[in-house]
Image (cartoon, rainbow, N blue to C red):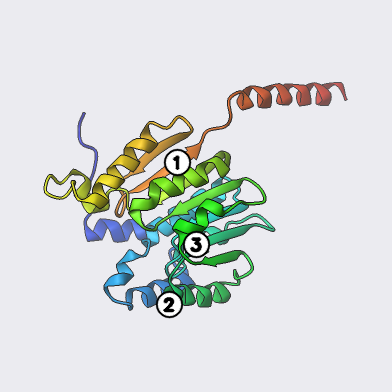
Amino acid sequence: MPDKHIELTEEVYNYALAQRSDANDPLLASLYADTLALGEVGRLAVTPLQASLISLLAGLIGTKWAVEVGTFTGISSIAIARMLSPGGKVFSFDQDFKYTSMARRYWIKAGLQDRIDLRLGDARRQVPFFRPRELLDFVYVDADKESYAAYYDHLCPQVRGGGMLVFDNTLRGGEMVDPNLRNKPINRAMDAFNRKLATDSRVQVVLLPIADGMTICRRMPPPGSELRRSIDTRQLDRVRIGG
């Protein structure tokens, strides 16, 4: 098959970046600048292109209840919270007070502080005991990579059919296929996780080679639910025709 991928030069990337609905968002631009000013750690943040994709996906499925594991400076939580249905909430897990303090400031600036519930502490201990009031619509994970499988195992059963789970850094900067680096413990864990998702019948999965790799999972509806929906639709049509 011919290779249809183009070289992602800086010029191409900047062009793509400019062609977004939220390309001129002053609040996110300010938050990105403050995040990058933190130094090397600022590179942990999602890219502007990823934030736009996260926001699009959350809005696409009508998200009301969401979980984020890995708050950092709040970019992804803002992307999700802006798209919530009325009365919705993002439950965001992180253990770093310094960076989440920056997130809180920007949540307030964005007027989203009532839509985001920060759970400060070790997510590895908190997530297993998290029980939402209703099934989740959207999950975003960008935290300790060795724990991705555990987060998935705890959260996937709590996501509704048609909901989404998104995982960042699933290509690990290309280390997954580097013969000199792929046997590092963190990379072995990520490889096992990627293979686990690809063979899990509960989800439909695609790993996108954007940024550091982003995996998008659609929670498959329970068996028979599509049939029930079609039956309900036919019954509704008969009521409309008869009434």
Left or right relative to 49: residue 21: right
Q: Where is mark 1, residue-wise?
A: 217
Q: In the rendered image, is residue 107 in sight?
A: yes
Question: Front-most of 145 and 15?
Answer: 145
Identify the residue shown where x is 38% and y is 45%. 215
Q: Is residue 89 above or below residue 223?
A: below
Question: Front-most of 239 and 124?
Answer: 124
Specify the amino acid type for callout 3. Answer: Phe
Q: CA separation, marks 3 and 1?
A: 20 Å
The picture quadrant where one finds residue 216 is top left
Which is closer to the viewer, label 1 or label 2? 2
Specify the amino acid type for callout 2. Answer: Lys
The picture quadrant where one finds residue 204 is top left
Left or right relative to 102: residue 185: left
Q: Where is mark 3, residue-wise?
A: 93
Q: Where is mark 2, residue-wise?
A: 98
